[in-house]
Every structure is written in structure tokens, then in C-alpha cells.
Amino acid sequence: MTDKDNLNTNLKRRHFLLTAGVGGVGAAAPVVAVRSTGDAAPATDATAKNETGGYRMTEHIANYYRTARV
């Protein structure tokens, strides 16, 4: 193959991948729009406290610290 043939093949592949990506985003947009227009459940006090973040020592974290000791 010549360099020009390689360039044309690469451009065709890139164009296909670009088209596939744009098509996927276009297909997902209506789904997201429909889901985002629904009424959200009001946040309760327990939910609001969890959304504030912060550090919580959980069993998973304790296991990590235990196994990471040198």
C-alpha cells in the first residue's frame, strides 16, 4: 500500500468512529431529557446529611488500612 492509500483508509476509519460517536450521543440525548424532566423525590434529612460528604470510617476502609500497613 502507498502512503496515500493508508491515509485514505485511516480517514475513513476516523470518519466512521466520529459518526458512530455522534450518533450514540444523539440517541442518548432524548432518553436523558425524558428522565431529567421527571419529578425528583424531596430530600429527607437523612439524605441531606449523606450528601454533605465528609469522611466516614467504614469496614471497607478499615480493611484497606489494615492491608496497606508496611
Image (cartoon, rainbow, N blue to C red):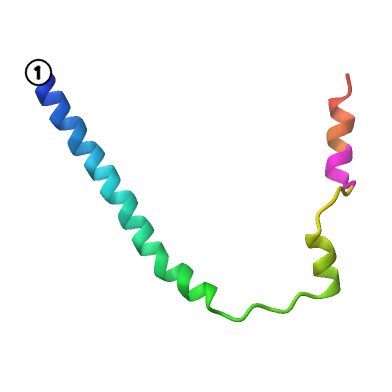
Picture layout, residue 30 above or below residue 11? below
Picture layout, residue 30 above or below residue 60? below
Amino acid identity at mark 1: Thr
User: Quick check: 62 left or right of 43?
Assistant: right
- Magenta region, mostly helix, strand or loop? helix
Which quadrant of the structure image shows residue 43? Answer: bottom right
User: Quick check: 30 left or right of 44?
Assistant: left
The residue at 15%/24% (across/down) is 6
Q: Give the range drawn in magenta.
A: 57-62
Screen quadrant of the N terminus: top left
Screen quadrant of the C terminus: top right
The residue at 32%/53% (across/down) is 22
Residue 48 lies in the magenta-colored region: no
Provide residue 69's location: percent of width, then percent of height: 89, 24
Callout 1: few (<14), some (14-19), or many (20+) C-alpha neighbours within 10 Å? few
Provide residue 52's location: percent of width, then percent of height: 81, 59
The residue at 26%/50% (across/down) is 19
The single residue placed furthest to the bottom in the displayed view is 39
Provide residue 13's location: percent of width, then percent of height: 22, 37
Q: How many marks?
A: 1
In-front residue for pair 29/66? 29
The residue at 89%/31% (across/down) is 66
* Residue pointed to by mark 1: 2
